[in-house]
Image (tube, rainbow, N blue to C red):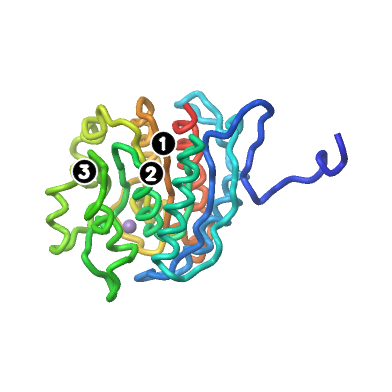
Amino acid sequence: MSYTELYLTKSPLVSLEIAGKEPKVAMFGVPFDSTSSFKPGSREGPNAFRNAYLNIEVEDHYLKASAERLPITDLGNMVLNFESEFMVDAVSKIVGELKDKGIAPGIVGGEHLLALGSARNYGGDSLVVFDAHLDYRNELCGLKISHGTWLRRLLENTSFKRVIHVGSHCTTPEEEDIYDKVKVVNVYDLEDNPDLFQKAVEGLNRVYVSIDLDVVDPAYAPGVGNPEPAGLTSRQMIKLLYGLKHTEIAGFDINELNPSMDTSGITAALAAKLYSVLAILASR
Ligand SMILES: [Mn+2]
């Protein structure tokens, strides 16, 4: 072994190479916040996530597994580009290439709009979205392609057989037709009946999971672009992911991490924990 191998790391990349093991999860960051409708800054999210990921314990007590023993490859961040259609198209193409190699994308954003690209080309059976908002508007701030419209744009042309939306508590009248296409389990229903999530995801195959961190209450996750009070606790959120332990996770993203709103770094730490759980599930 040489000194360069002994003393140098690839930090802040979160790549973990394990001899003889091919990575099943590929991390990449999408530093994009051009359609931000409240607090911009999530373009800095991927690097804040990496810093947290390298400094929290990723041994999972419940799953009896450690993300520290999972080979993950960190492909870096997408090139900086402020144009929405370029970003969506690029994410879609990267995800397609990973899919062909049998590697699950594990993306960190950046705005939720990135999921329009990743979910569009992921080609699986089911989509599970966690978000305080439905993101099912037709237009937001004059934009048809935006972090508040991406789910409507996706469902206008999709092959997903089932779409489950979890944790919402902000619905605008123009979004109410979402119930025709999506099984919505809102935060109040979940509180009254915690089994609703498990029932909703029963029998799902090849799931793509998209988490907007604002689904978690700002008391636990203030570092997001559009904080909304009355969200989930961080432990509730983690437990919901455990509910997917018998489901094949073929890809995921964690988005809207905004370090400029996250002075203590607790949101980045939560993003890192959620990422480790999903990476364990996606590697099974
Ligand atoms: Mn949201």
Dot in front, 1 or 3? 1
- Give whichever of 242, 281 is nearer the camera: 281
Name the residue that disc number 1 marks: 250
Q: Is residue 84 above or below residue 68?
A: below
Q: Residue at x 45, y 54 (%)?
A: 91
Q: CA distance from mark 1 to mark 3?
A: 22 Å
Name the residue that disc number 3 marks: 185
Residue 14: which quarter of the image?
Answer: top right
Look at the numbered disc 3 and give the secondary structure of its residue: strand
Residue 49 drawn at (x, y percent) = 54, 52
Indicate which disc, 1 or 2, sits on the residue closer to the N terminus: 2
Residue 136 drawn at (x, y percent) = 23, 58
- Give whichever of 117, 239 is nearer the camera: 117
Dot in front, 3 or 2? 2
Q: Is residue 209 above or below residue 21?
A: below
Quadrant location, ligand no. 1: bottom left
Look at the numbered disc 1 and give the secondary structure of its residue: strand
Instruction: Please say if the residues under marks 1 and 3 sit with CB atoms less than 8 Å apart.
Output: no
The type of residue carrying mark 2 is Tyr
